[in-house]
Amino acid sequence: MLSAIAVFLNDALLPEAPVALSNDGWFFTEMGRGCISHIPALGEPRRTLATTGRPNGLAVSADNTIWVAESRHPALLRLLPGAAAEVLTAGYPDNPIRWPNDLCIGPDGMIYMTDSGVLLADFEGVTPPEKAYKIPVDGKVLRIDPKNGDYVELDSGLQFANGIAFGIGGEYLYISETLTGNIYRYRHQEGAASEREYFGNVMQQPPRSYGRVAGPDGMAFDADGNLYVAVLVEGTITVLKPDGTVNDRIHLPGHYPTNLAFSQTHPTQAVITEIQGNQLLHVDLTVPGLPLFS
């Protein structure tokens, strides 16, 4: 599935959440700088759009609004003209959002977001690293109304909910669970979702065996229904077939890929964010990406 891979940016500080634009440009977050960055085209200098704290996930809706999953000051943000960030929701007083991680726009125009289920301050820099598996985690999947920030919990009790993506036709919503290596899916229904359904596992060995947090992060579909998953520590993009079995493992120059996205203008090309080398990788694939809902 891979024909070529190249590094085109190597000074992005903890990059995440690449978003392809229709004019050949890219947005992505730099968690280490606390900012959202913009590259007009591959190879051109980047500029800072906004600074929020520690932006984790990004999505762009049909009206060109930029939505930000902010993890250090937990909230879903709406980026306004002039680079001001407005809090859409930080959760309800008796049920706050803990770690907004990744998000996408659904076929219904709603925002779907993962809450990893633990505060960043309680999880970040834990020593020894394997202690992270003993921290209580209550990961959630949220469906958020972009008009007013009202939301419903579609699921809870996940062991660090992370990547999120809709499959072909929007029939299923897929979620990655980092601490187990599992990928789950939910049949999408208007205003709700079915019960959690196991889809597959991306790990070559159990996450706990690495002595640190390892497992699936962000992910994206191709037009044939294959799911490409960034796998932390194993340093791969693991490709799952439509039946959930492993089809391929694309090995990367770096062990901490965080996410990937297909280009809008060159559909068989993708950008991968990788934090060990603080780099953005450009890959040529053989199957075009599945267009996102907006």
Image (cartoon, rainbow, N blue to C red):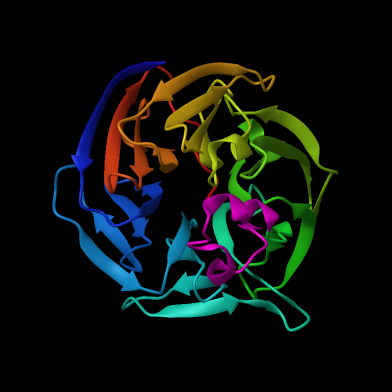
Q: Residue furthest left?
A: 44
Q: Quadrant of the N terminus?
A: top left
From the viewer's perspective, is residue 5 above or below residue 13?
Answer: above
Q: Nearer the viewer, residue 41 or 160?
A: 160
Q: Residue at x 33, y 54 (%)?
A: 27
Left or right? Give the position of 294 relative to 190.
left
What is the x, y in percent for residue 46? Answer: 19, 57
Q: Residue at x 67, y 67 (%)?
A: 145
Q: Which residues are magenta?
A: 111-134
What is the x, y in percent for residue 160? Answer: 65, 52
* Whether residue 173 is visible: yes
50 inside magenta stretch: no
Count the numbered circles shown.
Answer: 0
Q: Residue furthest front?
A: 128
Q: Quadrant of residue 134?
A: bottom right
* Whether residue 65 is visible: no
From the viewer's perspective, is residue 266 above or below residue 287?
Answer: below
What is the x, y in percent for residue 63? Answer: 46, 61
From the viewer's perspective, is residue 223 above or below residue 70?
Answer: above
Left or right? Give the position of 44 relative to 221.
left
Q: Residue at x 66, y 29 (%)?
A: 201
Q: Residue at x 50, y 63 (%)?
A: 124
From the viewer's perspective, is residue 129 above or below residue 210?
Answer: below
Q: Nearer the viewer, residue 172 or 278?
A: 278
122 inside magenta stretch: yes
Q: Residue furthest right?
A: 195
What is the x, y in percent for residue 111? Answer: 62, 59
